[in-house]
Amino acid sequence: MSRSPLWERVVSYGAVGATKAPDLMNYPPEGFRPFEGRTRIGHGDARWNYAWQEAMTWGIQRRSGIRVRLAESPREIGEGTYTPVSFDTGGTPIVPDLGAHGETVYGPEGQSFIAPGDSAMLTIPFGPFRVHAPCRVIYVIDEPKRKGFAYGTIDGHPESGEEAFIVDQTDDGSVWLTIRAFSRPASWQWRAVYPALRLAQKMYTNRYFRALSGPLG
């Protein structure tokens, strides 16, 4: 595993931003397994505000039992200037979302919201083991009733790919969480234990969907 700082490491896959593609399930990046799931997590403005603020401060991961350690990075990276190039189906470059115009913004408890270019080390418990999974925030969605982010894997993560977590509120007041991803084992060592890797992935995806549906606060 690379010993360089997380912010210096590149993502470990080529199709950066592909979780935005509307046809992801039918045409995933070659060699990757796609996933898309959506569940209702509540109703009303209180649930909406709670859910998106938790999502944008790594609350989905933390409430699923994952330790999130944010990596320090130079100011120009932390201010959201990380702009990976991705393309639409016609080959036109996609302009990445920059959240609040590259500014650092904070939640009600003073925690900073996720921004493009943020790097983090996720420590994932699986039985008696702890798996370290470095990742980088690829893009942020910041719309009035739709907010979320996607992270991509960095070298050292057991998988290679990208995962997006998007919270939205529909016209009837319902609040939903959508998860979109594509992945494959990062190395032959992880391919050798792929059934266990898939089991862990499924277990944590189920936890993600439950993470924002509990009591507010």
Image (cartoon, rainbow, N blue to C red):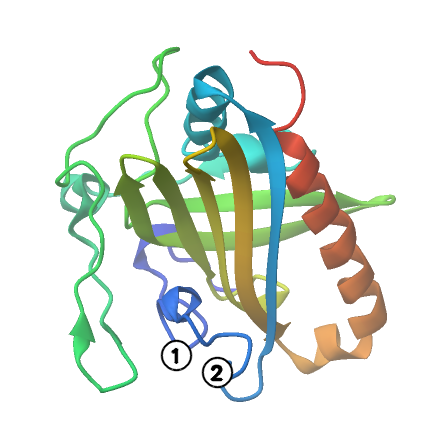
The C terminus lies in which quarter of the figure? top right
| Helix, strand or loop status at disc 2 | loop
What residue sits right under mark 2 in the picture? 29
Nearer to us in this view, 180 or 110: 180
- Badge 1 crowding class, 10 Å Cα cut-off, few under 14, some 14 to 19, many 20 or more, is few
Residue lying furthest front in this view? 172
Upstream in the sequence, badge 2 or badge 1? 1
Res 5 visible: no
Q: Which residue is drawn at 16% across and 39% down?
A: 75
Q: Is residue 12 left or right of residue 37?
A: left
Q: Residue 197 carries which label?
A: none
Q: Which residue is drawn at 65% across and 41% down?
A: 208
What residue sits right under mark 1 in the picture? 14
Q: Residue at x 76, y 56 (%)?
A: 202
- Badge 2 crowding class, 10 Å Cα cut-off, few under 14, some 14 to 19, many 20 or more, is some
Residue type at the position of mark 1: Gly
Residue 195 placement: quadrant: bottom right
Rendered location of residue 58, percent (x, y)? 49, 34
Quote the CA–CA distance across marks 2 and 1.
Answer: 9 Å
Residue type at the position of mark 2: Pro
* In contact (CB < 8 Å): disc 2 and disc 1: yes
Q: Is residue 146 left or right of residue 167?
A: left
Above/below status of 30 relative to 154: below
